[in-house]
Image: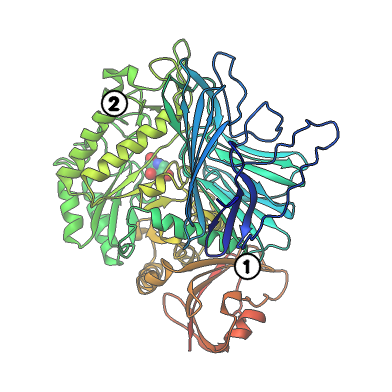
Amino acid sequence: MSDHIVLTGRRSSLVLERVANGAPLWRHWGARVTPGDLPPRDEQPLSFSPDVVVPLSTAPGFGLGGFGQPLLTAHRDGRDFSCGWDSCEVEANETQLVIRLSDSVARIALEQRFALDPVSDVLTISATLTNRGDGPLALGSLVPAILPLPPSSKTIRSFTGRHNAEFQEVREAMPAHGWQREERRGLTGHGGPAGLFVLGDGADWHHGPVHAVQLAWSGNSRLSIERDGPGWTLAAGEWFAPGEIRLAAGEAFTTPELLATFSPDGLNGASANFHQAIRSRAPWAGSELRPRPVHLNSWEGLYFGQNEAQLMALADRAAAIGVERFVLDDGWLRGRPDDRSGLGDWQVDHAKYPDGLEPLADHVRKLGMEFGLWVEPEMVNPDSDLYRAHPDWSLHIAGRAMVTARNQLVLDMSRADVRDHLFDAIDALLGELAITYLKWDHNRHLATAGDADGRASYHAQVAGSYALIDRIRAAHPGVEIESCAGGGGRIDAGIATRVERFWASDNLDAVSRAIIQRGFLAFMPPEMLGAHVGASPSHATGRVQPIEVRAGVALCGHFGVELDPARLNDADRDLLAGWIATYKTHRDRLHSGQTWLGEEPGLLWQAVGDPAHLILFVTIIDPPTDRLAPVRLPMLAGDGDIGVRLLGAVDATTATYSASWLANTGLPLPHMAAHSIAMFELKAA
Ligand code: DGJ
């Protein structure tokens, strides 16, 4: 038997060394290599260190002479706090690896699974820990694997955010000691998924080594990087509240999946790998995603002040400009004139809709549009019939005041009776109205997140939400779902297997959105990016922006409208209809192939498609301090000519340049003002 295990992807490899009875040791995770005979390891103990060197393995233990980040921390009433494996079985082929480990002293067993997708180059890693002892095992932490980062790593690119300011990029140097990001709000968070990119020597958007991870989980998380020898280690997994995870004898706990990738092609290469992986896990995987219909969402047009006549008139105006899916947002519930009451009572407000929602849904369908509906299943207002009937159904901690947010509490999704109740309510709506689309909202973070037993219930909350969504999808396979959480608070690869679309932000200001959407595209493909044309002045920022800019930025994702077209002047309404037609013409290209991001002094750009046929967006954020630099498009390197067309609500100029000119010298730009966007089509001539 060979002493090493190799998983080989398209552009990456993972090489591990087998060792007697312990977890395999990391020898390489990075560019594709043919390892041959493994070079020797440095087994010389450092001074003032244990006499036996403990090299980095996939599953480092704790307390036995290795001092780096451990895979897990656990104990039995304070005992069995150390961990070290004394038996190991490995099953491996070219792309899959299963490692089974056990510790006969701590009486635990671990199964780690690695699968390297040869197409996307994304490693999917998960682990299951089993308590083989006779007493309960308290789990402090458990991650799918500890990953190595090479000594040449230079920069961490991560994201932070809040409501209306999601996915704000942060770049930091590799730490001298450690770096961490913990999410304890019980939700993925407005900073995007628990994920990051590590840029190696010389890496940029297009070139150079990049390691990246994202956790497929919609709850608490912990990302940490720690200096370890000449390099660093990376751990990404769930964050557990005190006492949250206790395994009874024989019980097992499985981590969320971690998606990890290496690309030699810079940040764009790593994101392209993630996009492929997300597409292969998406609800439509294995079949073609049907063209993403143009949305009109009622929220910013009407908010709570709605009734049947207004909605029907809005639907007429939506259909007239080319909208294909009409989504009725919050405000349709009985007893919910605003956000202070009614949440949890999933019945229609007959004062606003005397005959229920059927007449509106019929009207929308007769106009040739699909009908979609907003729901927020996990939530309840204390002022609701549901809360009055079942006050015990909300997450709470005995003896402590409940913490409301947006006047609402969170239902305990770990309870089967709560899930059954919600399933019946949503199932009835979907059955009665032939709805083809749900916007699934979640408008607060978790606090006082205790279950009926008084234990922290963050993990169980996410598992319960997933179970409910899965059950609804199984019962209504034709219904698409959009994940929303006060804008983009629940965007991650865990829920991405259950939804077709994400609402990226409640901030529709085109300039803010351009930044938010670039962060989104680090992890998720553009066809899942809900992007709407909002009103001007923007409701989030008060900034005034022309319709072309708002439309151009929305074209970078799954296009929609979130305003009442009646409030536009005739010229702007015509322009919006023109942009909708442009989106329909180009959406196949916009929603397939690869996405590249880049920048030149004074501008940001995004290209989508393939080198033979690209759509390019160029965005100016701040007033340029000089003439704009041409946009270099490295993916076009090669022979041949490229026809370039400036697109708009009305198509404009065309020109032809050589591909190598565009790659190396760049596309010359027309004059562009601050806060503007230009859209080009580039086709091999
Ligand atoms: C928050 C969402 O992000 C909005 O789009 C809207 O659906 C509101 N909730 C409705 O309450």
Q: Position of residue 336 (x, y in %)?
A: 30, 33
Whether residue 502 is visible to the viewer of this picture, yes or no, is yes
Q: Which residue is mark 2?
A: 416
Q: Is 62 displayed left or right of 49 in the figure?
A: left
Q: Amino acid at mark 2?
A: Ala
In this view, the residue in front, 259 or 433, is 259
- Residue at 66% x, 80% y is 664
Ranked by sequence position, the earlier of labels 1 and 2 is 1
Q: Position of residue 434 (x, y in %)?
A: 17, 49
Helix, strand or loop at label 2? It is helix
Whether residue 406 is visible to the viewer of this picture, yes or no, is no
For label 1, count other residues whose C-alpha is less than 10 Å away and answer few (under 14), some (14-19) or many (20+).
Answer: some
- Residue at 36% x, 68% y is 580
In this view, the residue in front, 451 or 362, is 451
How many discs mark residues in the rendered view?
A: 2
Helix, strand or loop at label 1? It is loop
Asked where in the image residue 356 lies, by quadrant, the reply is top left
* Residue 447 badge: none
Q: Amino acid at mark 1?
A: His
- Residue at 67% x, 67% y is 602
Q: Position of residue 486 (x, y in %)?
A: 45, 41
- Residue at 15% x, 49% y is 359
* Residue 206 badge: 1
